[in-house]
Image (cartoon, rainbow, N blue to C red):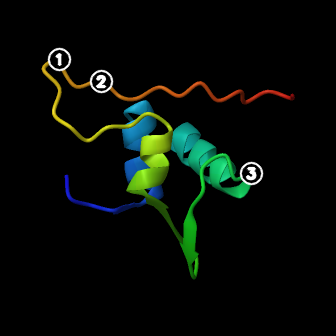
Amino acid sequence: MNKILFSPEEVAKILWGDWNNTTRKRVYKFLKEEKILGIKNGSTWWVSKSELQKLGYSDQPSTNQAKPFVSSFNIGND
């Protein structure tokens, strides 16, 4: 994939394999808390490919069946 910026929907699908109410809220919460660094253009958020790579995402084809990346973020109170 030659994309360098990803929408919140694409980020959720990469990290958790789905775009639903829960993953939508999670992506925006992570952006707001700067757990994922993003670029805001008006009301639209974008996440860079390099930011996803910091989380362990690779866009290289795998010999295994495609699986969503599952992060190790601590969502509870620290």
Work out whether residue 8 or residue 58 is closer to the camera in this orientation and state it: 58
Q: Are marks 3 and 2 in contact (CB under 8 Å)?
A: no
Question: Along the horizontal axis of the image, is 48 left or right of 3?
Answer: right
Residue sitting at the far right: 78
Query: Considering only order in the chain, which callout, 3 or 1, is on the residue closer to the N terminus?
Result: 3
Q: Are marks 1 and 2 in contact (CB under 8 Å)?
A: yes
Q: Quick one: quadrant of the C terminus?
A: top right
Circle 2 residue: 67
Q: CA distance from mark 1 to mark 2?
A: 8 Å
Residue neighbourhood size for the residue with mark 2, other residues' Cα within 10 Å, grouped as few (<14), some (14–19), many (≥20): few
The picture places residue 11, in percent across and down from the top left corner, at 43, 48
Q: CA distance from mark 1 to mark 3?
A: 33 Å
Q: Is residue 22 above or below residue 8?
A: above
Q: Residue at x 35, y 28 (%)?
A: 68
Work out whether residue 71 or residue 44 is closer to the camera in this orientation and state it: 71
Q: Please tell me the numbered disc located at residue 12.
A: none
Residue neighbourhood size for the residue with mark 1, other residues' Cα within 10 Å, grouped as few (<14), some (14–19), many (≥20): few
Query: Considering only order in the chain, which callout, 2 or 3, is on the residue closer to the N terminus?
Result: 3
The picture places residue 17, in percent across and down from the top left corner, at 37, 33
Asked which secondary structure carries label 1, the reply is loop
Asked which secondary structure carries label 3, the reply is loop
Work out whether residue 20 or residue 45 is closer to the camera in this orientation and state it: 45
Q: Mark 2 is on which residue type?
A: Lys
Res. 19 visible in picture: no
Circle 3 residue: 33
Circle 1 residue: 64
Q: Mark 1 is on which residue type?
A: Asn
Question: Along the horizontal axis of the image, is 35 left or right of 9?
Answer: right
The picture places residue 71, in percent across and down from the top left corner, at 53, 28
Question: Along the horizontal axis of the image, is 26 left or right of 50?
Answer: right
Find residue 64 and report its image quarter.
top left
Residue sitting at the far top: 64
